[in-house]
Structures are given as structure tokens and as C-alpha cells.
Image (cartoon, rainbow, N blue to C red):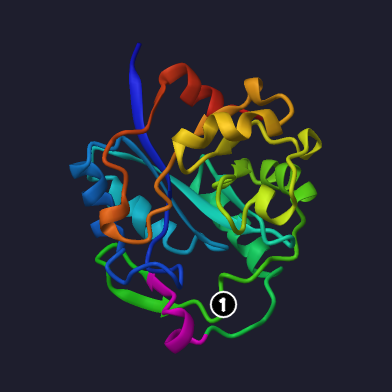
Amino acid sequence: MEKIVYDLHIHSALSPCGDNDMTVNNILNMAVLNGIQTLAITDHNSCKNCPAAMQVAKDLPLDLIPGMELCTSEEVHVICLFPSLEGAMSFDAYVHDRLPPVENRPEIFGEQRILNADDEIVGYEPYLLINAADISIEEVVPLVRRFGGICYPAHIDKSSTSVFSNLGYFSPDWGFRAVEIADRSRTKEFSPQIPGFENLLVLHSSDAHYLWDISQGENFLFCDDFRRLLGLY
């Protein structure tokens, strides 16, 4: 059965914690070198580098999914993926309107670079993107669905900004049908804590903030599982 090698959690230089070398061309070409077939750029609370990345991806042997790592009002990180750039950018505008109007201080948090397809800086996001949006975890699944996308909790094994670190539990009422576990060796540790775990699709991605963090091709899904991911809703 055919496999799809993926990395669905990558930060560009738009994320304040993302290295400035995480330009769209550097990310995508590194992914190709690493044998990745499907990639998602998921900056904190923004999709503004997805248009440039989609343009670059047209000339590469790689499928790019526009996305975002949303920070909910509970400060839980959720990966949001969209089948179309239009849907991603509409969601971007919705989220931006629900961010606190706190200006970024690049000397403290890092620059938030908006790039074009030539990796040139065309702007900076003024709002600090690592803040929590006014969107609760109970709202996320139906909200993302409205924009045509899918979503799932990020790095549930992380000691901060995860459902377990911040809320202490995982509720099936939230409607998620997939989870991301950063360290695959901890899957058995978390599976008993998640009702209906056997019905969830478990993903492992790099959460790369530096070029050397991008997956080396170790994460894959069979085609049927990948279609299941993209067709969850």
C-alpha cells in the first residue's frame, strides 16, 4: 500500500519563535531534500506566509497544505489545516480579529516576517502572534469546519500549551478525530487517558522552528489514512 511521507507542523519566520532562516523557499526545499511529500506550514495564529509558500510549492515535487497553529483562549495549541488557500486566509482574518491588540516587541519575542515567493520581506505582523485568541477549544472543530478545514490538538504530550498540560483531560465532546503526539514513544502513555483513542488518527510531526528540525522522512501515513485525515468532516 502506498505511503505518504508528511510533516504537518512547521513554523516559518512569521512565527516570532521561528528562525529567520525559516523562509518559504528554505523550508520547502529542505522538505524535498528530506523526502517529505506533503507539508503544512502552521504559524502561530496566522496563515500569512501560506500564499508565498503555495506559489513556491507549484514548482516542487511536494504537496503543500496551508495551515495554522491556533492558540485557543485556554492557551491550547490546535493544528488547523485547509484544502484551499482561500479557506485558510479567510480563517486567518477571522482569527486575527480575535487576537488581543498587543503589539509585538521583536527585540524580545522575535520578528514576525511576512514573505513573498522570493523570500523577500514584504511586511511584519504587528500583533504578537503567540497570544491566545478569543476562541475556546469547544468552538474550534465547528469553526474550522465552517472554513472548510480540519483540526486536531497539537503535541498533546508537551508540558505546556497542550490539552493535558493546560486542561488536564481530553474530551470526546470537543469533536476531534485526530491528535498529534510529538514523541511517538509516549503514545502508549497517553492512549489510556483519551476516551475513544482507538478511533483517533495519531500523527507525529516536527513542530520545526529551525531548518534542521524538519522531519527526515520518518513520519508517514498510508493513503487511506491520509484521505481519512483530509476527509474527517
The amino acid on which the numbered mark 1 sits, given as a three-letter code, is: Leu
Q: Residue 193, how many percent across, how many down? A: 70, 34
Give the left or right position of residue 67, taking residue 214 as reference.
Answer: right
Q: Residue 190, how many percent across, how many down? A: 61, 35
**Which residue is the site of mark 1?**
128
Q: Which segment is the magenta one?
A: 105-114
Q: Residue 107, how many percent across, how many down? A: 43, 88
From this view, report whether residue 108 is shown above or below residue 32.
Answer: below
**Any magenta on residue 86?**
no
Q: Which residue corresponds to the image point at 66% horizontal and 26% vertical from the top-left?
A: 197
In what quadrant of the picture does the C terminus appear?
top right
Residue 230 in view, yes or no: no
In what quadrant of the picture does the N terminus appear?
top left
Question: Which residue lies most toward the front here?
Answer: 189
- Residue 83 or residue 154, whichever sits in front: 154
Q: Residue 52, how many percent across, how many down? A: 36, 59
Residue 152 in view, yes or no: yes
